[in-house]
Image (cartoon, grey):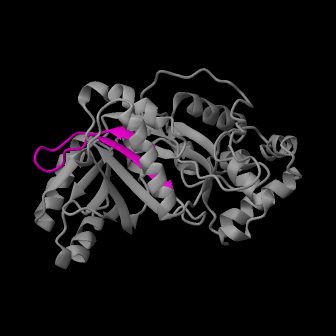
Amino acid sequence: MDVSELDDRDRAVLNAFQGGFPVVHRPFEPAAHALRSRGVDVDPAGLLDRVRTLDEEGVLTRFGALIDAEEIGGSASLVAMHAPEDEYDEVAETVNGFREVAHNYEREHPHLNMWFVVSVADADRVPEVLSAIEDETGQETYNLPKQREFRVEAKFLVDGPVPEGDVDLSHLGPTPEPTDRGTLTPAERDLVLAVQDGLPIVETPYEAVADEIGADVDWVVETLRRFNEEGKVRRVGVIPNHYALGYTENGMTVWDVPDDVVADVGPAVASLDFVTHCYERPRHDGVWPYNFFAMTHGRSEAESRERIERVREVMAEYWDVGDDDWDTLFSTRILKKTGIRLAERADANTA
């Protein structure tokens, strides 16, 4: 389905429910009520049908809980490397052959033209994996682990009803107290793995999950609500395929921000609603001078450039930004995208 084929109800669903879908026994009932209060004529059965169709047509990557892998256990790190032009595909195949590599992108940069994510159950294994990649490719790797996170809020809104995407029904349902446990119970581990690829798109999705793992539905609802409060679940809702919605321009802006203003710059840039990811990462002397990453997405090159310029304007409020102090690395190819493997990380963190 092309974005131009979406009607107003489809657009309302996409905008309203990219975060804050209810975690209650029959979530489509309050969700449909919330849309009707915004002037969108849809009943629970119609809403369910539209979410299912959007999923089947590839407009969604999935419907359900967006898990914060770091809170589940293990570690992930962004890595950059150079792949010679005449060996690029061969190097990419070698890197992608490592099961610890979750995502891999070709990006526009005169030297560091391959960017991938290494996900492991034990953070101490990252150097081991990178050493093996260097041995097999003959290329040096540059580890860029997250030092501070300022924003992870990948919402992709479309023109139409509920344009601000501000429907949040996450307060509905039970309000369990967060725990201070750093580990998962075996039952929680089973729940994480059952929902990581999405919820069943049925009238009672949490009951379907409970049946799958042999748990009580009240426990599933309460645990997912608690996970949301604890940060293990970033949000519950529709998770769009941003390429299908026309957000084809993926720009990773990188900045050499003075260390003494990073703490102020981070929240300011993170407040821009089109910035989907925003982190502080380490520099690498003589190779990589940038310590601040802000990811933007646009529906055209012009829109992407405008958004990057807006980031630069915010930066300039805090320090004197020179032309050599920043760069934008657009992705030109997706080389691998399997997602973070949660099973091993959850297993290692289950007590």
- Residue 161 on image: x %, y %: 77, 51
For the point 24% across and 29% down, the residue is 259
For the point 66% across and 48% down, the residue is 209
Residue sitting at the far bottom? 86
Depth order, front residue of 157/197: 157
Depth order, front residue of 10/96: 10
- Residue 15 on image: x %, y %: 69, 50
Q: Does the magenta stretch include residue 228?
A: no
Q: Is residue 253 rendered to the left or right of residue 187?
A: left
For the point 49% across and 61% down, the residue is 302
Q: Give the range drawn in magenta.
A: 277-297
Assign the C terminus to one quadrant of the image: top left
Asked if residue 167 can be seen in this view, the reply is yes
The image quarter in which residue 330 lies: bottom left
- Residue 240 on image: x %, y %: 60, 57
Asked if residue 190 can be seen in this view, the reply is no
- Residue 83 on image: x %, y %: 19, 68
Q: In this view, does 235 lie above or below 103?
A: above
Q: Is residue 296 above or below residue 229?
A: below
Assign the N terminus to one quadrant of the image: bottom right
Depth order, front residue of 345/109: 109
Q: Is residue 136 rendered to the left or right of residue 205?
A: left
Q: Is residue 322 rendered to the left or right of residue 264?
A: left
